[in-house]
């Protein structure tokens, strides 16, 4: 399982880093990405944390994590990532999880302490299935409908997602 997770992490990092703007649009991450930032952090216990895809954006830092299936332990680790990024860069920090098993997009709000909360934005890879993308494009072609930016991006990423 560990090797499979590592493989998918590498593939998606490659896909995203080729065109961050298209990747953000495809997954409905509503901000303009600027560039990737360092993906290593050191926590309070001097452990090295490796993040999947931290990106500097117009709204601060968005850390994109790729998960085959997200557990409670993963969510606790993501809290450490957000806190570490905030401490290191002193910028608003957001977490987006691309979940390979989740049926549809969702948000989950976690309480860090009585007054602070963290919203985790889950994006479903299943919802962005290549067959669904092709069906939408075929429907729009048959009905002479305009393509949206998301449709074009879907077409661009289709060979990589299949």
Image: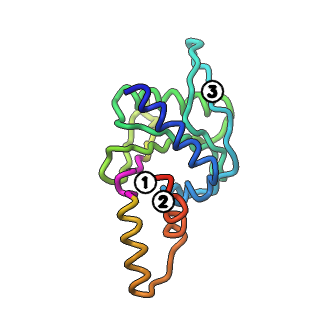
Task: Kindly identify the residue that appears in the image at 37 percent across and 44 percent down.
Answer: 100
What SS does tag 1 mark? loop
| Distance from Cα at disc 3 to Cα at disc 1 | 30 Å
- Tell me the residue that label 1 is attached to: 162
Q: Quadrant of the C terminus?
A: bottom left
Q: Which residues are magenta?
A: 122-129
- The Cα atoms of the two marked residues, 1 and 2, are separated by 6 Å
* Residue 37 in view: yes
Residue matched to label 3: 40
**CB-based contact (under 8 Å), mark 3 and mark 1:** no
Query: Relative to residue 47, is residue 133 drawn left or right?
Result: left
Q: Is residue 61 above or below residue 104?
A: above
Quadrant of the rendered image containing residue 101: top left
In the image, is 83 to the left or to the right of 56? left
Foreground mark, 3 or 1? 1
Q: Which mark is residue 59?
A: none
Residue 160 coordinates in the image, percent (x, y): 50, 52
């Amino acid at each position: 399982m560990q090797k499979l997770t590592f493989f998918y992490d590498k593939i998606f990092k490659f896909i995203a880093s080729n065109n961050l703007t298209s990747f953000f649009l495809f997954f409905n991450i509503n901000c303009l990405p600027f560039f990737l930032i360092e993906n290593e952090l050191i926590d309070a216990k001097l452990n090295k944390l490796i993040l999947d895809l931290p990106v500097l954006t117009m709204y601060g830092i968005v850390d994109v994590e790729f998960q085959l299936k997200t557990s409670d332990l993963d969510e606790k680790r993501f809290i450490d990532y957000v806190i570490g990024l905030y401490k290191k860069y002193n910028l608003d920090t957001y977490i987006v999880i691309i979940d390979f098993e989740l049926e549809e997009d969702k948000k989950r709000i976690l309480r860090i302490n009585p007054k602070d909360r963290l919203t985790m934005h889950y994006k479903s890879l299943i919802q962005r299935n290549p067959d669904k993308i092709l069906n939408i494009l075929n429907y729009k072609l048959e009905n002479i409908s305009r393509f949206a930016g998301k449709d074009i991006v879907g077409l661009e990423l289709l060979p990589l997602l299949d």
